[in-house]
Amino acid sequence: MGYHTRDMLRTLRIYPALLHAYWQRALVYRATYLVVLVNAAFPLVMMSIWIGLAQGGAIQGYGAVDFAAYYLVAILVRRITGCGIVREIELLVRNGDLSVYLLRPLNPVHYFVARILTARLVIIPIVAAPVIFGMLVTPGIWLNLAPLNLALFAAACAVGLAFEFTAQYALGGLSFWMTQAHGVSAAFTLAESFLGGYIVPLALFPAALQIGLQALPFQGGVALPVEIMTGRVTPEAAVARILVCAAWVVAIAFGARLIWRAGVRSFSAVGA
């Protein structure tokens, strides 16, 4: 058994305890998730705007009910795929507390992974309840709940979360050289919200631009999972777009690793 295989197995054995620790932390700070629930109301504003515009007729194939279904699913998907770790990384670097993590046997990335995964277990049920209620009281909403489609939806959400995390981890690595990495992260989030379908469904963009956006990873955060769940993409097209996002995740993860390696060397060199 090679060194890397043994190291991976050792890490996997540690994960249950790590996940349990962050689960307890999530329960202690569960009140903060009410803030997340309030923030989730943003798509409702966009939904009301588009529903109002659709009263005069369908827009690019989206009627009032279609917009309702899109944004209600988007609320849930965003809570599944969204994660914010840049400010936390920034504070750890700035205060020198990152050195504590660097002295531990696990790579610091695993602590952030554990925190994000356990947070999903708390926030998803909180958000899912009002979303499901909203769908039940809205006449005409239809979702594709076929087993294959649900599997594709789950895969798209997993890839979307992986993209969000790797991108955030890479941006957080900039904290080794700049004091306002969260400002870069805010700009990234704004661009992602617009180009990834959180503000405007990709179907409302010009056809040529839609093709370009489907070649980018931003769609994984909201647009792709939502389009799968609302039946607006074929299984074949969904698989192709999931693979595109997965390829981006691999590339970004590689870049994040390079950024962190260089950053940790710089961090250690100044005696933090």
Image (spheres, rainbow, N blue to C red):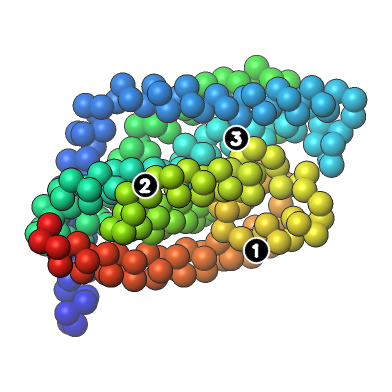
Q: Position of residue 185 (x, y in %)?
A: 44, 47
Seen at 22% across and 75% down, the residue is 5
Seen at 17% across and 79% down, the residue is 3
Q: For mark 1, does the 10 Å Cα neighbourhood hold few (<14), some (14 to 19), or many (20 or more) residues?
A: some
Residue 41: image quadrant is: top right
Q: Quadrant of the N terminus?
A: bottom left
The numbered disc on residue 180 is 2
Q: For mark 3, does the 10 Å Cα neighbourhood hold few (<14), some (14 to 19), or many (20 or more) residues?
A: many
Label 2–label 3 contact, CB within 8 A: no
Q: For mark 2, does the 10 Å Cα neighbourhood hold few (<14), some (14 to 19), or many (20 or more) residues?
A: some
The numbered disc on residue 156 is none
Of tags 2 and 3, which is closer to the observer? 2
Establish if 114 lies above or below 170: above
Choose between 126 and 100: the one closer to the eye: 100
Seen at 16% across and 73% down, the residue is 6
Residue that badge 3 annotates: 73
Choose between 8 and 254: the one closer to the eye: 254
Seen at 52% across and 21% down, the residue is 130
Q: CA distance from mark 2 to mark 1?
A: 29 Å
The numbered disc on residue 215 is 1
Of tags 3 and 1, which is closer to the observer? 1
Considering the numbered disc 1 on the image, is that residue within a helix, a strand or a loop? loop
